Amino acid sequence: MRALAALLVAFVLVSAPSEEPTRFATLRIPELVEASGLAASPSLGFSPPARHVFYAALAWQYLALLTGTLADYFHANERMALSARSQLAAGLALNVATLLFLALGGGLTGYCAAYVLGGAVGFGTALLGLRGMPWPRLRLRWGFVRELAAAAAPFMLLAVVGTISARLDVWIVTRATGEAGAGLYGAAFGLIQRLIVVPDGIATSLYPALAAASAGESTPAEGLLRRYLVWMGMVTLPIALAVSLLAPAIVAVLYGPRFAGAAPLLAMAIWLLPLAGVQMLAATALNAAHLQRITVRSSLLANAVVLTGLLLLTPRWGLIGAVTAILAREAVATTICAGAAIRRFPGCLDRKALPAAAIVWAITATLASLARMLPPGWEVVGIAAVMGLVYPGLLWRAGLLPGRRRLRGRTP
């Protein structure tokens, strides 16, 4: 557990925050300078095992920066699918490698190797995406730099606020609960960060189509956003429910009995997935409509909420308090962005379908909860059957799947 705590601290120290799907104007030179400065530091006081973790994290950071630079180029050319493909490939490689290396007894070394491998796969996939695209010519034009800096200001503020928030929660958790608590916290949120790639990829692919739709060049924006919201809910909600119910088994398989304390954290924190999915789509819609000020405002308020919550709840309730503060942050950001998106795109929410969706979800949650009571091993089969067979069948029967009567529309 102390080793995982060291891993968490090292990764937080060198890693950038998860990027907003529409953060196109990005200045990566300071990040490269920061990473190079950390690499040149003697050891930063780490023990030899922690130093190895630190340099593995640094290698992953370099790969992430290079991949992000290519993603910026894809965004500038409105080729979001290439960026999403790179993210999905990296996430898939990371998840599969983590499971494989841990199952083979790789321990902390295998865990670090999985991160480096995931970064390499993402970078390689992004490089393949450059085929057939014109290579940019590097020229320095101060007028363009000033124009770009003005346009990038809201996104840079989001990045700064996100960076501060990403560091503070780990620092506060470590101070309040010690290295053991940081290890449990890192185990739970490490899994969630891998799953966030799913809604992130969906939201990333939305921007060019929604920008064109807002300009009247494609499918109406409201129908397009409604369709994406439906798919986001259908994907993230069952994942969150399944992981929440199977959290003890998942933690036991991946980390062993010593990390059993991470199971309740994972069961709670996994609900960040659907909240983050809606927030990402809503923020993408607002940015496409040139309403970045709302996403900046929501980020500032949400991070003020999480900071207050971490300072007040973590010392009193421990790790559960920290997770509660993180959930509160995402709920605030989702409420602000989703409310603004609904006002800007009134038809994006099919209110007539909400009662049927609520009934379908209540039935699914009840059946999945009952399946959890099956004997050990069989509960996984039962929950998988509910999510993979019963849930889609109920959606189809209620007419909630895209292509059915209620949500029929053109595919973006």
Image (cartoon, helix red, strand yellow):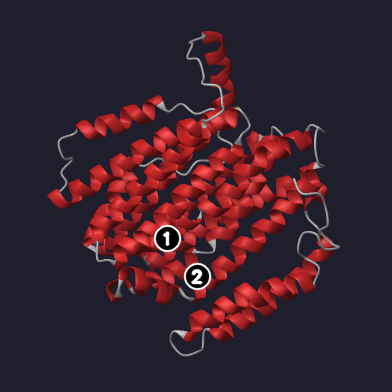
Tell me which residue sits at (77%, 59%) in the image.
Answer: 402
Where is the C terminus found, in terms of image quarters? top right
**Residue 257 rendering spot, x and y as whole percentages:** 29, 76
Tell me which residue sits at (34%, 57%) in the image.
Answer: 173
In the picture of the structure, the residue carrying the numbered disc 1 is 191
User: Looking at the picture, which amino acid does disc 1 mark?
Assistant: Leu
Is the Cβ of the residue at disc 2 closer than 8 Å to that at disc 1?
Answer: yes
Tell me which residue sits at (76%, 52%) in the image.
Answer: 226
The CA span between labels 2 and 1 is 10 Å
**Residue 209 rendering spot, x and y as whole percentages:** 71, 39
From this view, report whether residue 60 is shown above or below residue 70. below
Tell me which residue sits at (53%, 20%) in the image.
Answer: 149
* Camera-nearest residue between 127 and 212: 127
From this view, report whether residue 388 is shown above or below residue 40. below
N-term-proximal mark, 2 vs 1: 1
Query: Which element type, helix, strand or loop, lies under badge 1?
Result: helix
In the picture of the structure, the residue carrying the numbered disc 2 is 243
User: Looking at the picture, which amino acid does disc 2 mark?
Assistant: Val
